Image (tube, rainbow, N blue to C red):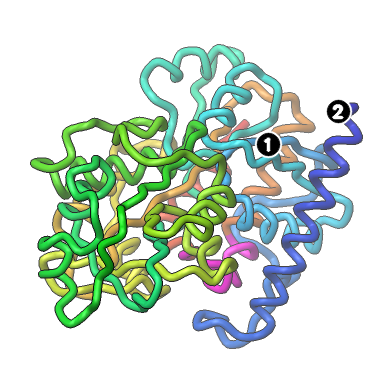
């Protein structure tokens, strides 16, 4: 397929997804902000404008693909004729394509790692690349257990499930967490992302921080558990879980909700917490930054290790990886426009798509960083 044709196809797919998600918003979510439309024309904070080229290319995280569709919808409303052609190939592939200079920016659920920072700066004409958090996404622990409408796990139990230390669902450890629930003697089948995935990285970071005795496999965008069955992309994980009795997997809440699959609650040590927009939002409020400046890598460890009551701890931040400087003028202007609209108008309606809108303290630094791009 020719590149220009592929871009038009991807743009059409993104638009169709945006219309679908926008319809969900119109039907009424639990965070509609007084009925505001997801495509409001109100002036966004910052220096948006509508200059620069009409089409941007991006690739990466499947976790953020539905959010990008909403952002595309908002940008097209604010700047008619503008579009981001987004290819959801996974966070690892997105970072690689950005470093290679094949796309304008990357979507990734994990920031650039140490050995990518130098090559990314080279791609940016000797200037630093920045990780800019644009949306938060709670990770749902989806499962397939006939007759089990409510399932409770803990971080330690989850570590044992995904490393093969618990092999059947009626294990005494699980039975103790689920009193009165008839757990079957079905074999546990972990479903993990077979592609390089920021969601995988975030789940493994959570297990490393919250269950250090039971998860010693490490972190990274490749699954380290050593058991189970792999599936490509978020959609693949949902499909595999639905098709496999005894399966448990991890996927962003929006995909789980779209598929109508159940997901587990987490015993955090401060009580059993279901995954809702409110409990995920409580977690996001505790997020801090690793450092000062405009490379906005978030510190989520306290969210993992010391969750407050009513806080669902397994939430990821998904970033746009951009050049701080080094783009052509047309590209830089368009990226700043898109990001500014996404950080403002585009946040409306995210909750109905399974995401958590940016808290004010994150949004303020994000807008500052966007304005600082050259």
The residue labelled by disc 2 is: 3
Disc 2 + disc 1, Cβ < 8 Å: no
Residue 140 quadrant: bottom left
Query: Does residue 28 sit above or below 81 in this rendering?
Result: below
Residue 352 visible, this orientation: yes
Residue 42 visible? The answer is: no
User: Residue 79 occupies which quadrant of the picture?
Assistant: bottom right
Residue at the image point whose x is 68% and y is 25% from the top: 327
Query: Is 88 situated above or below 104?
Result: below
Q: Which residues are magenta?
A: 344-356
In the image, is 10 to the left or to the right of 343? Answer: right
The answer to whether residue 105 is magenta is no
Task: Quadrant for the C terminus, please.
Answer: top right
Q: Quadrant of the N terminus?
A: top right
Looking at the image, tell me whether mark 2 or mark 1 is earlier in sequence order. 2
Residue 352 on the magenta segment: yes
Q: Residue 206's spot in the image, x, y percent? A: 26, 47
Residue closest to the eye, 103 or 295: 103
The CA span between labels 2 and 1 is: 13 Å
Front residue of 270/328: it is 270
Classed neighbour count for the residue bearing mark 1: other residues with Cα under 10 Å, few (<14), some (14–19), many (≥20): many
Residue under circle 1? 58
């Amino acid at each position: 397929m020719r590149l220009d044709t592929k871009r038009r196809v991807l743009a059409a797919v993104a638009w169709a997804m945006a219309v679908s998600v926008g319809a969900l918003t119109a039907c009424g979510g639990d965070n509609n902000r007084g009925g505001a439309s997801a495509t409001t024309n109100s002036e966004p904070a910052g220096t948006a404008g509508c200059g620069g080229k009409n089409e941007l290319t991006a690739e990466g995280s499947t976790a953020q693909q539905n959010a990008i569709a909403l952002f595309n919808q908002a940008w097209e409303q604010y700047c008619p004729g503008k579009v981001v052609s987004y290819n959801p190939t996974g966070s690892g592939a997105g970072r690689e394509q950005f470093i290679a200079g094949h796309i304008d920016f990357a979507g990734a659920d994990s920031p650039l790692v140490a050995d990518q920072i130098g090559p990314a700066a080279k791609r940016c004409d000797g200037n630093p690349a920045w990780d800019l958090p644009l949306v938060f996404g709670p990770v749902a622990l989806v499962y397939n257990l006939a007759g089990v409408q409510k399932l409770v796990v803990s971080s330690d139990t989850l570590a044992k499930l995904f490393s093969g230390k618990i092999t059947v669902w009626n294990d005494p450890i699980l039975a103790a967490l689920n009193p009165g629930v008839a757990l079957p003697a079905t074999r546990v089948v972990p479903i993990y992302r077979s592609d390089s995935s920021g969601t995988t990285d975030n789940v493994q970071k959570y297990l490393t921080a919250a269950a250090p005795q039971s998860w010693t496999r490490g972190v990274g965008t490749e699954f380290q558990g050593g058991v189970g069955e792999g599936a490509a992309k978020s959609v693949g994980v949902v499909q595999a879980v639905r098709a496999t009795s005894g399966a448990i997997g991890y996927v962003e809440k929006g995909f789980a909700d779209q598929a109508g699959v159940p997901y587990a609650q987490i015993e955090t040590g401060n009580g059993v917490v279901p995954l809702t927009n409110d409990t995920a939002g409580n977690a996001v409020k505790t997020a801090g930054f690793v450092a000062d400046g405009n490379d906005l890598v978030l510190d989520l460890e306290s969210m993992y290790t010391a969750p407050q009551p009513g806080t669902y701890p397994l939430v990821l931040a998904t970033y746009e990886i951009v050049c701080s400087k080094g783009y052509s003028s047309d590209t830089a202007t368009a990226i700043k426009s898109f990001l500014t609209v996404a950080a403002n108008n585009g946040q409306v309606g995210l909750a109905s798509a399974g995401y958590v809108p940016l808290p004010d303290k994150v949004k303020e630094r994000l807008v500052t960083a966007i304005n600082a791009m050259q």
